[in-house]
Image (tube, rainbow, N blue to C red):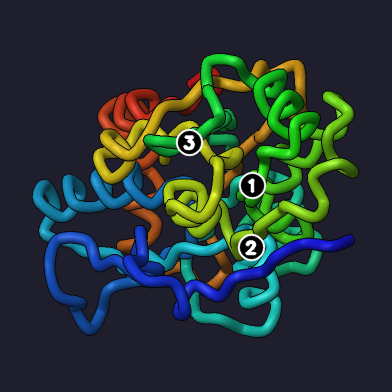
Amino acid sequence: MKVIRLVAGAVAGVLLLSVLVAGGERAPASPSVAAASDLSFALKEIADRFAQQTGERVELVFGSSGTLTRQLQDGAPFELFLSADESFVKQLATAGLTRDEGVLYAVGRIVLFAPTGSPLVAADGLDGVARLVATGRLTRFAIANPAHAPYGRAAEDALRRRGLWEKLQPALVLGDNVSQAAQFATSGNAVGGIIAYSLALSPALANRGTFMLIPETNHAPLRQRMVLLKRAGPVAERFYRYLQQAEARTTLQRFGFALPPH
């Protein structure tokens, strides 16, 4: 497959930090939470509120769910994992690394994003992408790497169903995770991309372009599951419970996540 792979460190103007500390500087006893990068804004807000209300802080580490799963399998000291694909949680549970199989906390959505000034019109959906391909006007198009990023797999699924996957190979730019794909999609070097709805709704992208939801029927559902690791301590346990309460769920909903029954 011919794709263009860009390294985040080599791209100016990084959109998202990979590590964020909720509520200020890292506290020595703060548990580490591994989270899918589509949660970069929503989870930071939730963790900040948790710190304000309890005085307890958690360290948030964002990345692709597949990469974080490999790190956990290699012994990374995370205490809580929020995956964008529940299959990774079940994989860790089968390996005996978690307390149980966790809980479904959200269902994600993907959008077609077009940066300001792009020939791509987001409102035209994937039909607009098809027209640019047909006229030779589609240069670079960004998605997360389907090899380890659930949002990349959803993007590939939607493009395949529209008959665009093979046609887009020369133009694809793969982000290591969906946050990096959003960074590439908003740059002047790409006509756009497929990114997480939660990122498109974030303040960082509010004035960077336009987007259109891709119908849920165009890809397999992004069922997002979280789980406590066996090493989880009391603070991680309390944060896990907090994430299931109304206040945190309302924040997730505001960032475009569908919520499972509570």
| Quarter of the view holding residue 13 | bottom left
The residue lying at 48 percent from left, 49 percent from top is: 182
The residue lying at 64 percent from left, 53 percent from top is: 144
Quick one: label 1 or label 2, which is nearer the N terminus?
2
Quick one: label 2 or label 3, which is nearer the N terminus?
2
Mark 1 secondary-structure assignment:
strand
Q: CA distance from mark 2 to mark 3?
A: 45 Å
| Quarter of the view holding residue 26 | bottom left
Question: Which residue has dot 3 on it?
Answer: 118
Q: Quadrant of the N terminus?
A: bottom right
Rendered view: 218 above or below 165: above
- Can you tell which mark lies on residue 98? 2
Residue type, mark 2 in image:
Thr
Q: Position of residue 50 (x, y in %)?
A: 20, 49
Q: Position of residue 203 (x, y in %)?
A: 25, 39
Residue type, mark 1 in image:
Phe
- Can you tell which mark lies on residue 141? 1
Could you tell whether 150 is left or right of 198 in the image? right
Residue type, mark 3 in image:
Ser
Mark 3 secondary-structure assignment:
loop
- Please tell me which residue lies in front, 196 or 44: 196
Whether residue 143 is visible, yes or no, is no
- Please tell me which residue lies in front, 40 or 140: 140
The residue lying at 24 percent from left, 45 percent from top is: 45
